[in-house]
C-alpha cells in the first residue's frame, strides 16, 4: 500500500505564522515547504496545529492537497512551559477530527517534542507509522550553552519518542550521532534528511540593485538573520565586529526580532554601546520572506554565530543567494557550509578568528564571488522538491518494513 494521506503535527506554532514572530522560525518553513511539495506530488496532507489569533478558519485550504487544521491546544497566550498540559486534549481533538471526516492516514509525522507526544498517541490509536523530526533537542542545547533552560519533561519525552517511533529523521549526521550518544536512540531507525531551500525565491541578485532598493550605501555589510535570543550568539558577533579595521566603515544588519524580544534587543544594543560599535549596529526587525533575498544579496557576508543550530536554513538561504557564510562548527552547519569553499566555520567560540574571517571576506571581492558561486551551486542540490521526495521515500520504506503496527 502506498502513501496517500499524511498527518503532519505542528502543535505549538502554526506553519502559516510569519517567520520571526514569536517562536516561528525554520521549523515553520520546513513544515510549510514539505507539505507544499508533498501536495504537488499528489499526497493529501493535513497539518494539525493549535488555534491562534488571526487564523482564517478552523480548517484552511493552504495549497493543492494541503489543509491546515486548527484545534484547541490551550489559550493562544499560554506560555510554552504550560503547553504540555493541553497535549491530551489536542490529541483527542485529532482523533475526533479523523472520525468526523471519515478519512485514513498512512503516516503521522510529528515536528518538535510537543508534537511528538501527540503523534505517538494518535498513531498508536490509528495503527499507523509514526515519524518524528525534532528540529532541536534539549540535551544538545544544554551542552551547547550553559544556562539553557528546558521544560523538565522535554528530554525524557524526546528519549521515549526515539525509542518508540518507527522513523526518526535527523537534519544532519551530527544530530544522528547525538541522538545515539545522548538518548541511546536506535541508529537503524534514524535517517538523515537535511532541510531544503526555495531556489526560485532565494537566488543571486545584483548587489548594487539590492542595496539601492534597501537604501544602503557603500559600507561593508555584515548580515545576521534570525531570532534575537542568547542561543544565537549575537554577543560574540558584537565582540568580533568590534575587532574589525576601524578605518573601514561597516554595518551589521540584524534582521529578526519582534516585540517579544525587546529585552534581548536592548541587551545587544547595550553591548554594542560598551564596545563602541553602537552606530554600526542596525536593527531591522522582522522582514517578510519575499524581501530576504535583497538583504542576502546586498550583504558582503552572512554570519551564523549560534551556539547551536540543528541545521541553519539561514546559511542555506544565504548561499542560494550567492553570499558566503561565517559561523561555527556546531549542529548541522557543517552539513550546509563547506569550510574554505562556501564560507568559514570555526571550532572555537573566540571572537578573534571570527573577526579574521570577516576581514578576509570583506576585503576580497574575488574571494566573495568564488565562495558565493560555490554556495549557489551547493544550494542547487538542496531544493525542497528533493527533500520532499526523500521524505516520501522514507514514508514508503517505513510502511513496507513495519507493515501493520
Image (cartoon, grey):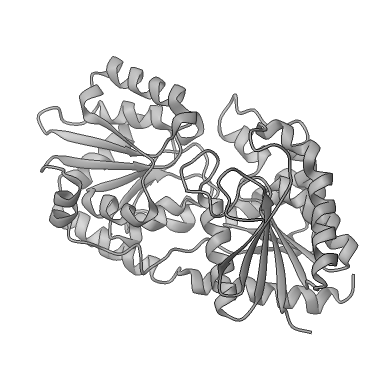
Q: Nearer the viewer, residue 218 or 187?
A: 218
Locate residue 363: give its quadrant.
top left
Residue 332 x, y percent position in the rendering: 52, 52
Which residue is the extreme one toward the bottom?
Answer: 1
The reply to whether residue 111 is visible in this rendering is no
Locate residue 150: give its quadrant.
top right
**What residue lies at 80% left-to-right and 73% top-to-bottom?**
103
Number of numbered markers: 0
Residue 402 x, y percent position in the rendering: 84, 73
Quarter holding the C terminus?
A: bottom right
Q: Nearer the viewer, residue 362 or 316?
A: 316
**What residue lies at 88% left-to-right and 61% top-to-bottom?**
124
**What residue lies at 28% left-to-right and 35% top-to-bottom?**
355
Q: Is residue 180 above or below residue 203?
A: above
The reply to whether residue 61 is visible in this rendering is yes
Locate residue 171: give its quadrant.
bottom right
Q: Is residue 393 above or below residue 270?
A: below
Q: Would residue 382 appear left or right of 2 to someone viewing this image? A: left
Residue 375 x, y percent position in the rendering: 33, 62
Which residue is the extreme one toward the front?
Answer: 57
Residue 274 x, y percent position in the rendering: 30, 15
Q: Nearer the viewer, residue 317 or 360?
A: 317
Amino acid at each position: 500500500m502506498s502513501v496517500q494521506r499524511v498527518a503532519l503535527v505542528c502543535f505549538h506554532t502554526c506553519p502559516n505564522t510569519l517567520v520571526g514572530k514569536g517562536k516561528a522560525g525554520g521549523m515553520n518553513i520546513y513544515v510549510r515547504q514539505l507539505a507544499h511539495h508533498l501536495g504537488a506530488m499528489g499526497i493529501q496532507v493535513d497539518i494539525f496545529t493549535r488555534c491562534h489569533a488571526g487564523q482564517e478558519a478552523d480548517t484552511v485550504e493552504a495549497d493543492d492537497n494541503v489543509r491546515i487544521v486548527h484545534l484547541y491546544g490551550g489559550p493562544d497566550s499560554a506560555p510554552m512551559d504550560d503547553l504540555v498540559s493541553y497535549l491530551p486534549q489536542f490529541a483527542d481533538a485529532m482523533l475526533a477530527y479523523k472520525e468526523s471526516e471519515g478519512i485514513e492516514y498512512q503516516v503521522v509525522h510529528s515536528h518538535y517534542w510537543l508534537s511528538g507526544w501527540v503523534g505517538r498517541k494518535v498513531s498508536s490509536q490509528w495503527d499507523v507509522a509514526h515519524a518524528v523530526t525534532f528540529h532541536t533537542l534539549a540535551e544538545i542545547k544544554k551542552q551547547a550553552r550553559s544556562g539553557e533552560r528546558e521544560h523538565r519533561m522535554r528530554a525524557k519525552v524526546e528519549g521515549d519518542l526515539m525509542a518508540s517511533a518507527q522513523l526518526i529523521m535527523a537534519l544532519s549526521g551530527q544530530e544522528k550521532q547525538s541522538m545515539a550518544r545522548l538518548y541511546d536512540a536506535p541508529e537503524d531507525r534514524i535517517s538523515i534528511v537535511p532541510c531544503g531551500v526555495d531556489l526560485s525565491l532565494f537566488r543571486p541578485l545584483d548587489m548594487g540593485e539590492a542595496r539601492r532598493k534597501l537604501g544602503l550605501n557603500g559600507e561593508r555589510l555584515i548580515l545576521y538573520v534570525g531570532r534575537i535570543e542568547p542561543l544565537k550568539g549575537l554577543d560574540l558577533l558584537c565582540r568580533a565586529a568590534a575587532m574589525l579595521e576601524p578605518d573601514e566603515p561597516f554595518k551589521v544588519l540584524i534582521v529578526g526580532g519582534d516585540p517579544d524580544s525587546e529585552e534581548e534587543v536592548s541587551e545587544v544594543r547595550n553591548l554594542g554601546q560598551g564596545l563602541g560599535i553602537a552606530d554600526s549596529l542596525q536593527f531591522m526587525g522582522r522582514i517578510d520572506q519575499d524581501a530576504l533575498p535583497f538583504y542576502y544579496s546586498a550583504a558582503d557576508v552572512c554570519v551564523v554565530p549560534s551556539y547551536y543550530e540543528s541545521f541553519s536554513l539561514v546559511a542555506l538561504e544565504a548561499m542560494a543567494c550567492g553570499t558566503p557564510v561565517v559561523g561555527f562548527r556546531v549542529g548541522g552547519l557543517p552539513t550546509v557550509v563547506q569550510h574554505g569553499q562556501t564560507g568559514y566555520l570555526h571550532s572555537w567560540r573566540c571572537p578573534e578568528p571570527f573577526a579574521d574571517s570577516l576581514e578576509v571576506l570583506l576585503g576580497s571581492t574575488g574571494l566573495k564571488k568564488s565562495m558565493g558561486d560555490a554556495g549557489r551551486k551547493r544550494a542547487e542540490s538542496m531544493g525542497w522538491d528533493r527533500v520532499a521526495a526523500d521524505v516520501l521515500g522514507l514514508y514508503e520504506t517505513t510502511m513496507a518494513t513495519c507493515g501493520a503496527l
